[in-house]
């Protein structure tokens, strides 16, 4: 095998509970993450030497400090591979959107190089490498539906949502630095009327869209909507047009709305596509 193509799936957070600040500066979190079929496409080709990266999006970093480069470098060096690789990223996932686009690319590069060079590493092996690169990388190697905890790098797979959820995703077109979101979050002010993780886990077993939509929760929302009211407006528009529930993903700014079914998702999309430039219909995978 000389080259490989691989889909690099984005994620949304069905729940995101920020629990406590750790001594190492990170936070303990508890989140249920879900892959959706809005994906980048990664092309990896064997080269005689060096790591070369190209991307169709001019703002995606491709130098030696970029996550994509470091991901390839880490696995090649660890397994003493003397050849290089050329990596091309066909970017579809919006940048800095709370959908783990960079982490998804990192995961796909690890998975792709594993296959390309027949390293025969298990998912567990790859997740171990992914932990060293970023908090969401282990999940993006796993994909599907999963509970992530600790700093977000510990992942427990869950049964997939069945039937798949149909979701409308809207990105407002600005970026929110994750570091800013964590630094400005006052944990004492987060409303915790119930154990959102437990409630969502029980609802996921039933797999009913209305129940899942009812239990959406994100610790960041109140803080971020206060500073970026456009996010709250998008949530309101999704619900007004028929979404069962809506939530900001991760530290934002992307907002998603859960539809009752595929037909309803297309109805909502048609109503809102003239208002928002970056809008997609996706389903869970």
Image (cartoon, rainbow, N blue to C red):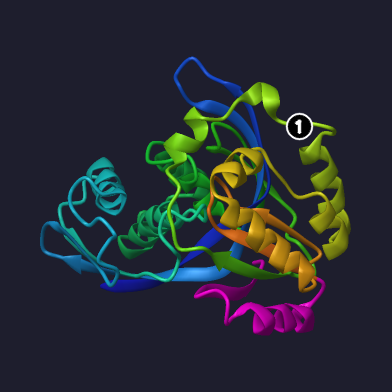
Left or right of residue 176, residue 91 in this image: left
> Which residue is at the front of the view, 19 or 153?
19
Disc tally is: 1
Percent of width and height locating residue 191: 76, 32
Instruction: Please say if 168 is above or below 61.
Output: below
Residue located 61% across and 59% down the image: 255
> Which residue is at the front of the view, 226 or 47?
226
Observer able to see residue 208: no
Percent of width and height locating residue 68: 30, 54
* Quadrant of the frame with the N terminus: bottom left
Left or right of residue 124, residue 189 in this image: right
Residue located 54% across and 49% down the image: 228
Report the residue marked by disc 1: 191
- Quadrant location of residue 62? bottom left
* Quadrant of the frame with the C terminus: bottom right
What's the magenta region?
260-285
Left or right of residue 33, residue 39 in this image: left
Percent of width and height locating residue 241: 76, 74
Residue located 67% across and 66% down the image: 284
Observer able to see residue 194: yes
Q: Residue furthest left?
A: 49
Left or right of residue 231, residue 192 in this image: right
Percent of width and height locating residue 29: 61, 32
Residue 277 sits inside the magenta stretch:
yes
Q: Residue furthest top?
A: 23
Instruction: Please say if 220 is above or below 91.
Output: above
Assess disc 1: are there few (<14), some (14-19) or many (≥20) residues with their C-alpha within 10 Å of its C-alpha. Answer: few
> Which residue is at the front of the view, 188 or 90?
188
Q: Name the secondary structure under disc 1.
A: loop
Residue 2 sits inside the magenta stretch:
no
């Amino acid at each position: 095998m000389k080259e490989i193509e691989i889909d690099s799936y984005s994620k949304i957070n069905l729940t995101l509970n920020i629990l406590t600040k750790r001594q190492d500066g990170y936070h303990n979190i508890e989140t249920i993450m879900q892959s959706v079929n809005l994906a980048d496409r990664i092309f990896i080709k064997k080269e005689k030497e060096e790591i070369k990266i190209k991307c169709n999006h001019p703002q995606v970093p491709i130098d030696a400090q970029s996550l994509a480069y470091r991901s390839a470098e880490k696995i090649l060096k660890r397994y003493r591979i003397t050849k290089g690789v050329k990596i091309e990223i066909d970017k579809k996932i919006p940048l800095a959107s709370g959908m783990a686009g960079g982490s998804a690319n990192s995961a796909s590069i690890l998975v792709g190089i594993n296959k390309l060079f027949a390293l025969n590493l298990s998912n567990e092996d790859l997740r171990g490498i992914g932990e060293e690169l970023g908090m969401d990388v282990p999940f993006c190697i796993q994909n599907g539906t999963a509970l992530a905890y600790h700093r977000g790098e510990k992942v427990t797979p869950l049964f997939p949502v069945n039937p798949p959820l149909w979701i409308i995703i809207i990105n407002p077109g600005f970026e929110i630095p994750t570091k800013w979101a964590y630094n400005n979050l006052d944990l004492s002010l987060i409303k915790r009327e119930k154990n959102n993780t437990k409630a969502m886990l029980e609802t996921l077993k039933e797999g009913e869209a209305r129940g899942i939509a009812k239990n959406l929760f994100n610790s960041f929302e109140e803080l971020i909507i206060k500073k970026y009211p456009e996010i709250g407006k998008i949530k309101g528009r999704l619900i007004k047009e028929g979404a069962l529930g809506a939530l900001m993903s991760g530290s934002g700014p992307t907002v998603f709305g859960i539809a009752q079914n595929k037909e309803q998702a297309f109805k909502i999309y048609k109503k809102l596509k003239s208002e928002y430039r970056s809008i997609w219909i996706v389903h869970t995978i």
